[in-house]
Image (tube, rainbow, N blue to C red):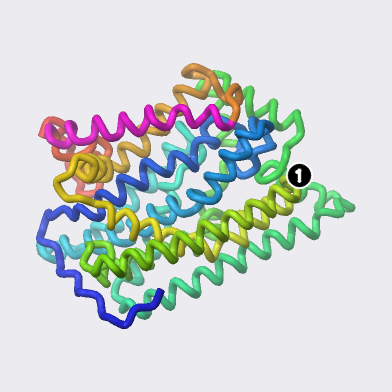
Amino acid sequence: MADSSPPAPCPPPRTGERLLTLDALRGVAVMAILLANLPGFALPDAAYANPIAWGGGRMIDIIVWFVTEALVDGRMRGLFSLLFGASLLLILQRADAAGANGAALHLRRMGVLFVIGLIHRTMIWSGDILAHYALVGVIALGFVGLSIRSLLIAVGILVGLQMTNGWLACLGLLTAAARDTPQSLALWNAYQLAFGTPGPVDLAREIAAMRGPWSSAVAFRLAHNSNPLFDLIEIGPETLSAMLLGMALFKSGFLTAQWERARYRRYARWGLGISVAAYAIIACGVMASGFDVRAVALAELFLTAPFRLVGTIGYAALILLALRPGGWWTTHLAAAGRMALSNYLGTSVLMTLLFHGHGLGQFARWDRAACYLAVPVVWAIMLLWSKPWLDRFGQGPIERLWRAAANGYRPNMRE
């Protein structure tokens, strides 16, 4: 993947200027991440990583799991994180060009985003990533002045740290497999809830809470959600590595489509070839184990870690090659990306209305493959509402509230 030709420099954007490439990439990410998140909306938590935990007994369900593992898992979250890092630099550049304090603005934005994330993960859906992004975003601010080379070195170190964290977690699980002490039994059962096949009592408790009234779902999330500070330790290195990679790719001109198309083709071919092949091989190993909790955890926490950013770069290159400024798809994807926060939260609202008890109560009633019937509907909504809304209001509704709260003024939704 190395290339000796130097990339074209990325010029500082003018104040208020939108970058089509970032918006379109973000639009693809906010749509495609639904493919990974759907089991989290519709099925018990363990089914997110392990299809036989619930709703995955048919061959078609296993095939759907395999395809999403090979093509999607980790890479769309990585693309989101990558774009988060690039946007951080863009916001700082705009603030500096306007004579404002970019660092202070960024910290205010992260504070508001953290609150939005806490509300989302408690009141709507436990799979929220916004609160985590806010915490990591504060740390990422300390890296903005690094050169491309230094950023890439930091990325490598963080990937190594994430793999170390993952291996230690897996080692704890392997050690607990004997279940010969109360502590090892408790640890084993905890891993079963996350990656294995929970017992019927645990499954029934979660299903009853999600099918029940909104208050019961909130109570369940309050009792079972992880602490955002724990998430920062557990997956923070992975998230930060993607954000720093986004900074490096923005500075190099990669994310602003300033490289030659031949280079993008190489990055797409190698990035996706390596990543998809590695994920597919690992998924085959998990299937061969009979979806044993140890194999699932080893795959999710350790084995796939070095291939996530490789695949993320490959997807970014492929999307940038496919963009056609002025075309219908590019225009509408960019609009969905400009409203990524509204679309992300809106997806959670729609999916919980479909699957949870305060809506249609379909939680754990659909098989895994059937859940994906909802994807075209949600994608169509994102593509068809985003551009008309922006044409009328200029910003997404949640983006406007976020900006107003960060800048300390009352939002006017009519402007």
Task: Examine the rendering and report whether any part of residue 368 can be seen.
Answer: yes
Q: Is residue 253 above or below residue 225?
A: below
* Residue 79 appears left or right of 231: left
Residue 225 x %, y %: 57, 41
Please tell me whether residue 373 belongs to the stretch shown in magenta.
Answer: yes
Task: Examine the rendering and report whether any part of residue 218 can be seen.
Answer: no
Residue 365 x %, y %: 60, 22
Q: Identify the residue at horizontal 23%, vertical 38% (top origin).
A: 396
Q: Amino acid at mark 1?
A: Asn
Quadrant location of the C terminus?
Answer: top left
User: Which quadrant of the structure image shows residue 342?
Assistant: top left
Say which of 384 and 341 sits in front. 384
* Residue 163 appears left or right of 408: right
Q: Identify the residue at horizontal 12%, vertical 54% (top origin).
A: 16
Prevailing secondary structure class for the magenta stretch in the rendered image: helix
**Within 10 Å of the Cα at label 1, are there few (<14), some (14-19), or many (20+) other Cα atoms?**
many
Q: Identify the residue at horizontal 73%, vertical 39% (top origin).
A: 197
Q: Is residue 77 above or below residue 415?
A: below
Q: Identify the residue at horizontal 47%, vertical 40% (top origin).
A: 35
Please tell me whether residue 176 belongs to the stretch shown in magenta.
Answer: no
Which residue of the protein is positioned furthest toward the top in this rendering? 360
Residue 243 x %, y %: 38, 62
* Residue 192 appears left or right of 278: right
- Residue range corresponding to the magenta coloring: 368-392
Q: Name the residue that disc number 1 marks.
A: 189
Q: The residue tagged with tag 1: helix, strand or loop?
A: helix
- Numbered-mark total: 1
User: Which quadrant of the structure image shows residue 234?
Assistant: bottom right
Say which of 2 and 28 sits in front. 2
User: Which quadrant of the structure image shows residue 90?
Assistant: bottom left
